[in-house]
Amino acid sequence: MKPIFALVDCNNFYVSCERVFNPKLAGKPVIVLSNNDGCAVARSEEAKAIGIKMGAPAFKIRSLLDAHSVHAFSSNYALYGDMSRRVMQTLTDMAPSIEIYSIDEAFLDVSGMRHENLTAYGQHIRKTVKQWTGIPVSVGIARTKTLAKIANRIAKKSIRENGVLDLTDSPFLEEALKRIDLEDVWGIGRKYAHRLKKYGIHTALSLAKLDDRWIQKLMGVNGARIVKELQGISCYGLDDSPPPKKGIGVSRTFYAEIDKFDDLKTAVSGYVCRAAEKLRAQKSAANVMMIFAATNRFKAHYDFHIATAALPVPTSDTTEMLRYADQCLRQVYKEDIRYKKAGVFLSALVSAERVQAGLFDKTDRPRSKCLMETLDRINEKMGAGTVRYAAAGLASNETWRTISRQRSPAYTTDWDQIPMVA
DNA sequence: TCTGGGGTCCTAGGACCC
DNA sequence: TCTGGGGTCCTAGGACCC
């Protein structure tokens, strides 16, 4: 049976989350900013219409924001993560199988519904998600994931489609492909679009008509797959149980630059604690740790230094990882450098259950495992950071820490911040 | 003054082996 | 002086995604 995919994509997701709890924002220009209130990472339609670009630095669009009274929010990941879970749960209940592709997108396998009216089904999804979560979504339906992406894009932009477009065996498929620019095709970024345009290829339609071997030479197997997908031949199936991550990283840009070792160590220790938590959450242990620190990449002299530690036994123990992080950081750190960003990468991950103890290992592993489990359980129940390592700093007023001047309340994840209905 | 964070996959080339 | 062929594994870098 040839597959059919539906791509459900939340409209301007972070902005929509803010609007659910603040209805006065409807119809007004709204943006959500990245960490340190740095760049615009989500924009309402009104904000896009004003000319605010994705990723625009806040300081460069300041006058635009003021002139149009744009509502700008700091990122509220606790809120967006929780709203995402609600949307995904709703979709899970409505489809035979689902692949959660990102925080605001999911592919559904709708092959079994091919005799039904898929447009009506799409409308049903839209209505239900909106009703149960308050989040508006668009639905694109097609024979391949790449085509479903395209259908979704058109559904979102075209008023006539009313948020849903089914391109399955559609006579309008060619017309749709003609309307899609190269760089809007899933898997074609700026670089490849530029290269293809030199050969006179400008739309998804001209891409779909390319010769197999020719595109393979230019873009490798991925390019050949994209072309096939555009032709309606499915190369990417539905992946409903994504494998554990192969690497885990935590990094931040500081609000103010750091030049003291102790401050840098406090910052990095915090990131290591968070990375170890993520590692344990997916039941993995790491063989390799990398610590890096860098200066401001927008200044003339850019410095980036990284040190690697091979962990003798794969571990997810925070205490142990903090020790190695300290060693690495001593190799990285230099006086008289003003650091703007630092982070940790954990790689060569293995399943925590299959860790072999080293011959000369002196660590009491069962004991440390028990401690970590207790720590994670308390923090899950009582809120993140209830119990934490002193190494990561107890003060929250250091000048380098990430700031969020315009953060909305944690409406759905904190009892003290739940909206009241009077 | 002020510019995010976290991932994936593929490929080419080097090291090494028989 | 002459200097094969084929395979695997690993790594760095490039390109992409949200």
Image (cartoon, coloured by chain):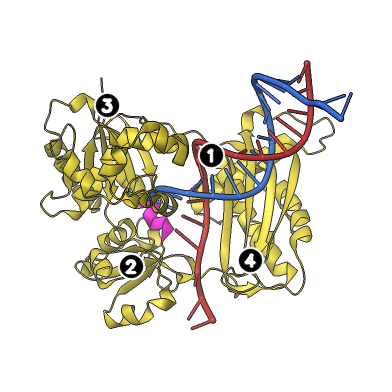
Chain colours: A yellow, B red, C blue
Mark 3 and 1 residues: CB-CB less than 8 Å, in contact? no
**Amino acid type indicated by mark 4:** Leu
* Image coordinates for residue A226, horizontal then vertical, percent: 36, 37
Quarter of the figure with residue A285: top right
Q: Are marks 1 and 2 on the same chain?
A: yes
Q: Give the side of residue A393 with respect to residue A327, left or right.
A: left
Q: Secondary structure at mark 1?
A: loop
Q: Say which chain tag 2 marks.
A: A
Q: Secondary structure at mark 2?
A: strand
**Amino acid type indicated by mark 2:** Ile
Q: Which mark is residue A31?
A: 2
Which residue range is magenta in the image?
A76-82
Q: Are marks 3 and 4 on the same chain?
A: yes
Q: Which mark is residue A394?
A: 4
> Which is in the foreground here, disc 4 or disc 2?
2
**Which sits earlier in the primary sequence, circle 3 or circle 2?**
3
Estimate the spatial distance between the alpha carbons at disc 1 and disc 4, rounded to whole Å. 30 Å
